[in-house]
Amino acid sequence: MGKEWLERFWEQKTAVLGLILILIFTLAGIFAEQIAPHDPYAVDISRKLLPPSGDFLMGTDQLGRCVFSRIIYGIRTSLATAVAATALMVLIGLPLGILAGYAGALADNLVMRLADIASSFPSSLLALAVVGVLGPSLLNIVFVFVVLWWAPFARITRGSVVKLKESAFVMAAQAAGSSRGAIVVKHILLNSISPIIVLATLRIAAVIMHVAAFSFIGLGSQPPAADWGVMLNDSRPFLTSHPLMMLWPGLAIVVSVFAFNLVGEGLNDALLPTSGSAAVVKEEANG
């Protein structure tokens, strides 16, 4: 089965392109110290707003900082935040979904009502409210997204578990005397993980975009952080005179989101080629 889905994935050129882009971004973030030619926080007014050159590949900003170096270091903020936030969503939603689908009745109603409540809140408005109370912070923004966006993972997991627990191989494991824990881990979890992987990939792209948006309006990462959203905000006053300042961080956001969406679509087609879960995952990712 693993070989089959890998073959289906590699047949999709756009998905492979997305994976290559993600690997490039990831390696650039890991080896930022070696790749970045300058200190991303070094201020030198004498070299402010320089155009791209051999020394400054993307020019400098209004404080003379190297834009290319800040873009490279910004990968760490964007990707690390998105991956960590999505991992927390999975860690919350996956066990709750398994509990709802396998335990049934009371647990199912409780978890699904909590998921409905979480989904009913507009994430952006709640983030604004939390920031208003606790202050602007990337951590506060991520907290809101994790609290609200675990629900799709729980719903998808619950749907998969409800189908699987009545399947022949699960009933055979029960008849053989396997414990509930062993059945959940060996038979249910492993066979319901595919849609979670697809949704997580698509959700990472959404988190990158939202984090950059909140940093852009001053509610996420704060200056002088090497963050793509912060860089976009810093470049606003120079949009007409030095448009490249805004182009580079904007391009980084677009390419990274585009790459994760390509991989997500590829995984969706490879892991869920004939499953009704594919449409459900897309709906949850866009919801």
Image (cartoon, helix red, strand yellow):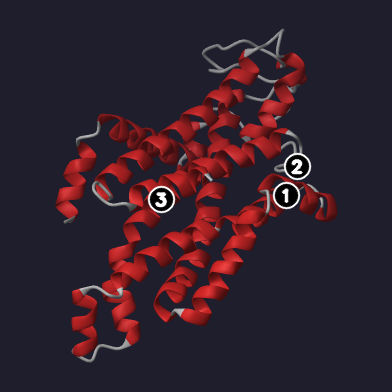
Instruction: Give the distance between the C-alpha atoms of the residues marked 2 and 3, in whole angstroms.
Output: 32 Å
Q: Earlier in the sequence, mark 3 or mark 1?
A: 1
Residue designated by label 2: 219
Asked if residue 50 is positioned above or below residue 218 in the image, the reply reads above
Asked if residue 254 is positioned above or below residue 270 in the image, the reply reads above
Whether residue 41 is visible here, answered yes or no, is no
Residue placed at 70% from the left, 15% from the top? 47
Q: Amino acid at mark 2?
A: Leu
Under circle 1, the secondary element is helix
Residue 132 lies, in percent from the top left, at 83, 50
Q: Are marks 1 and 2 in contact (CB under 8 Å)?
A: yes
Under circle 3, the secondary element is helix
Q: Amino acid at mark 3?
A: Val
Taking the image as shown, residue 31 lies to the left or right of residue 215, namely left
Residue placed at 32% from the left, 51% from the top? 276
Residue 11 lies, in percent from the top left, at 19, 35
Residue designated by label 3: 280
Under circle 2, the secondary element is loop
Residue designated by label 1: 127
Q: Amino acid at mark 1?
A: Ala
* Nearest to the observer: residue 193 or residue 157: 157
Q: Which mark is residue 106?
A: none
* Nearest to the observer: residue 276 or residue 118: 276
Q: Are marks 2 and 3 in contact (CB under 8 Å)?
A: no
Q: Earlier in the sequence, mark 1 or mark 2?
A: 1
